[in-house]
């Protein structure tokens, strides 16, 4: 595929499926059970329509930059943590970090990365967060946190929804086993050794509770976000615990087959927390209009996972950058068609339920805030 000729993110998906080893595609595309939650993420965006407004000012060059923890990004789209990226390209996280840096956004680096944290941090040029999986003991977790601090991570994203391995029927049927060429350098550097199990490419993790969240919050001055929040009560407790934000995520539909679509969860969570509390959305974003819908319903930014891995497989760093560039162009185009001068003008008045009343269970007008 000539990535320069891609018209939409789905073009990358089709080309990646056609050229990838079937067992690797099954691992990447698959979700828990028969993939119901994967579909729920995408379907939720289709339940929301956009409503253009008459322009109040010139909207020919809409502003898309967003400030997160002091860093200004060119657009509110981050690379979600994914692993094992080595399945899809030999440069794995290094390619993704460089692409994010080149396009002016940032990468959330998985604990389960192939390359070492020092290498990835250098490739990212400072624009990176660490996603934290808890392995074996608090001692190992603290080693990971200290390493993140040492190498300049600008935030910690603590995954709360993937402590236990899930059944993924498509992956199991394809006979997926983590190949020998995949390494887990960050885990080894903190003293975690083990062989990932067949079907899920993972080592057993330490389940986390709210007590662990409180401990982690007190362990570091780096901003802490909780990833895997779907319930408003958990969002409220996250605020009370003193974390700096949450990622509304169902782990890409890979953990619980019947999990709520993340855009549905966002519509419930946004009214339940203070308007200045940082909300990110992860799951189902496939185009620029999806980004706008998430922002209209209260997200400050979104994270993408599978789409940039399709680009990684097809063309390494250039493929990831091409996916990000396409989303950036679509975001600008959507804002122009909505007659909005920039993302700060997005609010709930531009969205309507296309078919489901779920989104009107309680939404708020989005206020504009600056996150230091």
Image (tube, rainbow, N blue to C red):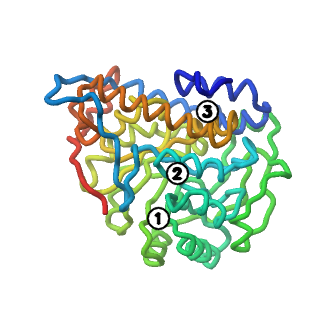
The residues tagged by marks 3 and 2 sit, at their Cα atoms, a distance apart of 32 Å
Tag 1 residue: 154
Q: Position of residue 166 (x, y in %)?
A: 66, 46
- Location of residue 63 in the rendering, given as x and y in whole percent from the top left corner: 30, 39
Q: Please tell me which residue lies in front, 181 or 127.
A: 127
Look at the numbered disc 2 and give the secondary structure of its residue: helix
Residue plotted at (76% across, 37% down) = 24
Q: Is residue 31 visible to us here?
A: no
Camera-side mark, 3 or 2 = 2
The mark lying in front, picked from 3 and 1, is: 1
Which residue was labeled with disc 3? 35
Identify residue for label 2. 101
Label 3 with label 1: CB-CB less than 8 Å: no
Vertical comparison of 145 with 293: above or below: below
Q: Residue at x 53, y 21 (%)?
A: 7
Check disc 3 and report its element: helix, strand or loop.
Answer: loop
Residue 146, by quadrant, is bottom right
Q: Which mark is residue 283?
A: none
Q: Residues within 10 Å of mark 1 (few under 14, many from 20)?
A: many
Callout 1: SS = loop
Label located before the other in sequence (3 or 1): 3
């Amino acid at each position: 595929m000539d990535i320069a000729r891609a018209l939409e993110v789905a073009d990358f998906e089709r080309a990646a499926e056609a050229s990838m080893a079937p067992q690797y595609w099954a691992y990447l595309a698959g979700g828990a059970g028969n993939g119901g939650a994967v579909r729920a993420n995408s379907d939720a965006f289709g339940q929301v329509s956009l409503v253009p407004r008459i322009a109040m000012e010139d909207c020919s060059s809409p502003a898309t930059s967003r400030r997160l923890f002091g860093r200004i990004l060119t657009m509110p789209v981050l690379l979600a943590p994914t692993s094992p990226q080595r399945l899809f390209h030999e440069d794995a996280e290094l390619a993704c970090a460089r692409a994010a840096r080149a396009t002016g956004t940032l990468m959330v680096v998985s604990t389960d990365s192939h390359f070492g944290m020092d290498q990835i941090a250098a490739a990212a040029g400072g624009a990176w967060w660490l996603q934290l999986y808890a392995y074996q003991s608090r001692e190992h977790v603290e080693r990971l946190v200290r390493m993140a601090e040492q190498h300049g991570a600008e935030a910690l994203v603590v995954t709360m929804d993937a402590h236990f391995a899930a059944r993924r029927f498509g992956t199991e049927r394809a006979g997926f086993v983590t190949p020998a060429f995949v390494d887990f350098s960050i885990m080894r550097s903190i003293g975690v050794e083990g062989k990932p199990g067949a079907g899920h490419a993972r080592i057993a993790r330490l389940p986390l509770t709210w007590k662990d969240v409180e401990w982690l919050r007190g362990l570091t001055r780096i901003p802490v976000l909780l990833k895997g929040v779907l319930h408003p009560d958990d969002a409220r407790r996250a605020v009370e615990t003193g974390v700096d934000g949450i990622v509304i995520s169902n782990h890409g539909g890979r953990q619980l087959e019947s999990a709520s679509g993340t855009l549905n969860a966002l519509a419930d969570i946004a009214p339940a927390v203070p308007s200045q509390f940082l909300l990110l959305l992860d799951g189902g974003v496939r185009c620029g209009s999806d980004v706008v819908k998430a922002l209209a319903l209260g997200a400050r930014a979104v994270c993408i996972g599978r789409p940039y891995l399709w680009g990684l497989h097809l063309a390494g760093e250039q493929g990831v950058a091409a996916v990000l560039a396409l989303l950036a162009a679509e975001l600008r185009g959507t804002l122009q068609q909505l007659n909005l001068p920039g993302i700060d003008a997005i609010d709930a008045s531009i969205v309507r339920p296309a078919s489901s009343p779920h989104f009107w269970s309680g939404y708020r007008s989005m206020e504009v805030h600056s996150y230091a």
